[in-house]
Image (tube, helix red, strand yellow):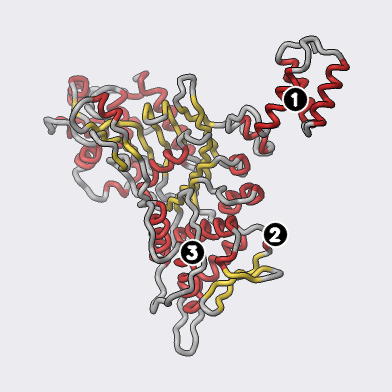
Amino acid sequence: MRWDELEAAVTAVLRIMERFPQPVDAETLVNYANENDPAWRLRSAAVVVHYQALVVIDLLELAWSPDGANRQINEAGRSYLAVRAAGSQTALYEDPRLRDWAALTEARESFRGHQITEANTFSRLELSQWRQFSEVAIDFHPRLTVLTGANGAGKTTLLNVLAPHFSWAAQLVTSSARYRELGSGTHVARVGQLSYSNGVWTPIQEVLTEQTTVQPLQIPSQQPVPGIFISSHRSISGYQALQNLPAKFSTADALLTQFANEVQTRYSGGNSRYSPLYRMKEALVAAAMYAYGNAAVVANSEARDIWEGFQDVLAKLLPRALAFRRLVVEDGDVWVKTSSSQFPLEAVSGGVSAVVELGWQIFLRGRGADSFTVCIDEPENHLHPELQRTILPTLLEAFPLATYVVATHSPFVVTSSRDSLVYALRNDEHGRVRSRQVRDINSSATSDETLMSVLGLDTPLPQWAEVELQRALTAVPDDPKADDLRLLRERLIAAGLGAQFPAAIDALRTDGSTL
């Protein structure tokens, strides 16, 4: 912690506050403190120390904030400036209110040192008393952060908080119930805070109005984060014959925009003439046509890189049993060639199609990127358990410069990578959702063990089996003899539950029998 620089930044920000008779937003304060120098944000150390100064001002209560975002200097802040003006040292490092924050900040800075590159990404997300959440605190891993929990726990909601960074129109419904608690007028409520790897942090705010509306949260100091958002809605596409080919090969960004627009249209309930898969086929056929050139067409290196590079990605992502070899174009269609057969791109199974579309979007987003962030909601959709087990490891291998934030129900996805941070969203005693970092996760655990230890299931048994097991246990007397246990075992075997006999014995012991 650079305490001298931090004290100077705190002083500079407070002096800016003194100039204003009303509360001022964070961006104005830090910009004015740096004399509106447009280049100051290029100096990462300056960015970090000025946003840390805002935290210190809040912790020491040197300013008043009416909404958790704008600040106005108070008497404590003026006293701080008076001490500094007199030439006295304020010794921030000696203030007990800052000790825990300083230790935690240094630990997080050390953790950020493991980032794969300098490209900006998310560092920490905090939410408090918002929607179904009581308290949520997520520290993001440099490569893979996994969010898991039951339906309704809020996994997708957390991803949707991040979605505006990737131009994804997330559907967050703002309820009018909270508005009625606060009274008439439009209210801006602070619901959390988002921190970035570049040292900037920003409040997260919800605008409350009389009407129930669909709108994103406000992120006043939102920072650019290169990346992509992939929703849980996988496209269902039938065969469409190619209508025409572009006269000029498009860039990777343009191809991704075309694909993403079709996905967003369907996600929002709309429709268009072409499916996302059609846009992919159109791009691949064009890439094959322009890649190598001929006597009349000049070869296009970008087209060749996309045509060959995407096939390299598919070789890593597709299941080994498929024995993928390459793509070929014939009569305006893209064919998938394996070691034993070939078939049109539209004829692949739902699971393989889901993997192909995931790979296509991430591949295009990563073209020319130093590094980037990928948010994926339920990557396991349409996938066989074997593909669920391998999808994240293969994505990590295929795109080594990507940072992933994933929401999932699948125990196979949860345990698929040791080098990750896993957070479980669970209800507390009041029925509100809290996040818990799963520190002792067993990556070698079976899916049943993960379902119970991480996802919170009481039992992985089917409901009929649970009922039958309970009936068998109820029939056992309080003081069972050997014949009673033998009868229990026979009844379980007859019901197809013989493997549950040891668990049944444990249950009898837990219930207080004399076993």
Residue 261 at what x, y percent from top left? Answer: 38, 59
Q: Measure the alpha-carbon separation of dots 3 and 2.
A: 23 Å
Indicate the amino acid at tag 3.
Leu
Residue nearest the viewer, comparing 427 with 114: 427
Instruction: Assess disc 2: are there few (<14), some (14-19) or many (≥20) residues with their C-alpha within 10 Å of its C-alpha.
Output: few
The residue that disc 1 covers is: 503
| Tag 2 near tag 1, CB within 8 Å | no
How many neighbours does mark 3 have within 10 angstroms: few (below 14), some (14-19), or many (20 or more)?
Answer: many
Residue placed under numbered mark 2 in the picture: 321
Disc on the earlier residue, 3 or 1:
3
Circle 2: residue type: Ala
Q: Earlier in the sequence, mark 3 or mark 2?
A: 3
Residue 482: image location, x then y, percent: 87, 16
Viewer-proximal residue among 180 and 222:
180
Residue closest to the far bottom: 295
- The circle drawn on residue 450 is none
Q: Nearer the viewer, mark 3 or mark 2?
A: 3
Q: Is residue 75 visible?
A: yes
- The residue carrying mark 3 is 277
User: What residue lies at 31% left-to-right and 44% top-to-bottom?
Assistant: 222
Q: Secondary structure at mark 3?
A: helix
Of the 4 image quadrants, the one containing the C terminus is top right
Q: How many marks?
A: 3
Measured Cα–Cα span from mark 2 to mark 1: 36 Å
- Local crowd at mark 1 within 10 Å, few (<14), some, or many (≥20)? few
